[in-house]
Each structure stands twice: as structure tokens, then as C-alpha cells.
């Protein structure tokens, strides 16, 4: 499956942008990337702190099979972990339901939303990755991917790695 790529300078939330595409019946597998995100969201209406230089993206695709949201979340976390592991010299762990950690510190969050349009079910996978900067959060420790990187990280290479992982694997699960 090939994904259309939409690059934005600034957006309130890549997931909000994705929701609007689906509502406007622009229905194709899509990846949305934003350089700046002003109102990023996490699970249970938590705010995702979107620091400059980090990755803010959403992936939209149609899902045909009946999967629980829990199973789809797990699948997406595994795809993202697989796509990012080559950038870290330390092991990346999944903290259920939707976080990726290095040395027990959060560096990536995944927000999933489902939407029905034209009789079809769509999944929006919002991904926030602390690549270069980490927010200070009292509830848990955070880190950034570059702290554990084997070499200087190029965000375009990270985007491509995630895109390739989805394009090469997602159809097996739909």
C-alpha cells in the first residue's frame, strides 16, 4: 500500500487535520507531517507537548477487519518501534497501551482514533516523537531519541523509515 504524503509548516494537531480530511471524503492512505504543532493531543484528552524540532505526524488508512482498538494500538506501536530501533543504540520498549520508552523514559506517544465515513472504518494514528528535545513532565520521566542515537538523526530519514514500515507491512493486517 502506498501512502500520500502531506507536509505542513504548522497545524493545531495532525490528528485534527486527518479527521478533517476524512470528513471531507478525501479518503486515501495518507501520512501528514507538521514542522510545528500547536495543540497536540494524547490519550484521555492529555496534551502532547510539541517542542520545536521533534516529530509530529499522523497516518490514515482504512481498516477492513474487525480488530479491537487495543490490538490495533499494539500493532501500530510495534510498527513504530521497528521503524525507530535502528536510530537507537539502546533497546526500545513498548509501555502499554501506547508509549515507547528507552531506559524506562518516554520518548514517543501514539494516539489512535477511529472514524466511519462512506460506510468504511478509518484509523488515524497520531505519532509524537521526542527526537531532539524532551518536555519536563512531573508524572513520568521523558527523554529524546537523539540522546541514544548511534549518529546524528535526520528527521526526513525517520519519516521515511516509518512510512516504509507501514507501506511494506500494513496490508498483511487489514
Image (cartoon, rainbow, N blue to C red):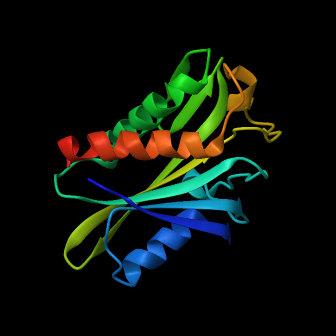
- Answer above or below: position of 139 versus 42: above
**Picture coordinates of residue 58 (x, y %)?**
50, 57
Residue depicted at 75% across the width and 49% down the height: 53
Residue depicted at 79% across the width and 39% down the height: 133
Q: Is residue 73 visible?
A: no
**Picture coordinates of residue 40 (x, y %)?**
66, 60
Left or right: 52 in relation to 57:
right
Front-most of 38 and 73?
38
Total marks in image: 0
Residue depicted at 29% across the width and 41% down the height: 168
**Picture coordinates of residue 70 (x, y %)?**
35, 42
Left or right: 59 in relation to 36:
left
Front-most of 17 and 140?
17
- Answer above or below: position of 95 versus 49: above
Picture quadrant of residue 155: top right
Q: Is residue 18 visible?
A: yes
Picture quadrant of residue 153: top right
- Answer above or below: position of 31 versus 153: below
**Picture coordinates of residue 102 (x, y %)?**
63, 22
Left or right: 34 in relation to 85:
right
Front-most of 12 and 54?
54
Which residue lies most toward the left here?
65
Residue depicted at 60% across the width and 38% down the height: 108
Left or right: 58 in relation to 134:
left
Amino acid at each position: 500500500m502506498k501512502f500520500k504524503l502531506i507536509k505542513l509548516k504548522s497545524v493545531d494537531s495532525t490528528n485534527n487535520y486527518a479527521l478533517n480530511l476524512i470528513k471531507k471524503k478525501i479518503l486515501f492512505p495518507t501520512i501528514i507531517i507538521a514542522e510545528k504543532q500547536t495543540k497536540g493531543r494524547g490519550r484521555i484528552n492529555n496534551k502532547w507537548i510539541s517542542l520545536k524540532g521533534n516529530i509530529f505526524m499522523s497516518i490514515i488508512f482504512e481498516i477492513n477487519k474487525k480488530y479491537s482498538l487495543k490490538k490495533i494500538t499494539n500493532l501500530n506501536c510495534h510498527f513504530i518501534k521497528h521503524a525507530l530501533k535502528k536510530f537507537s543504540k539502546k533497546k526500545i520498549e513498548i509501555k502499554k497501551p501506547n508509549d515507547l520508552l528507552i531506559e524506562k523514559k518516554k520518548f514517543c506517544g501514539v494516539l489512535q482514533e477511529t472514524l466511519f465515513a462512506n460506510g468504511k472504518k478509518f484509523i488515524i494514528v497520531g505519532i509524537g516523537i521526542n527526537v531532539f528535545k524532551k518536555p519536563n513532565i512531573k508524572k513520568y520521566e521523558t527523554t529524546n531519541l537523539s540522546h541514544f542515537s548511534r549518529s546524528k538523526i535526520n528527521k526526513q530519514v525517520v519519516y521515511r523509515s516509518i512510512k516504509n514500515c507501514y507501506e511494506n507491512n500494513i496490508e498483511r493486517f487489514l
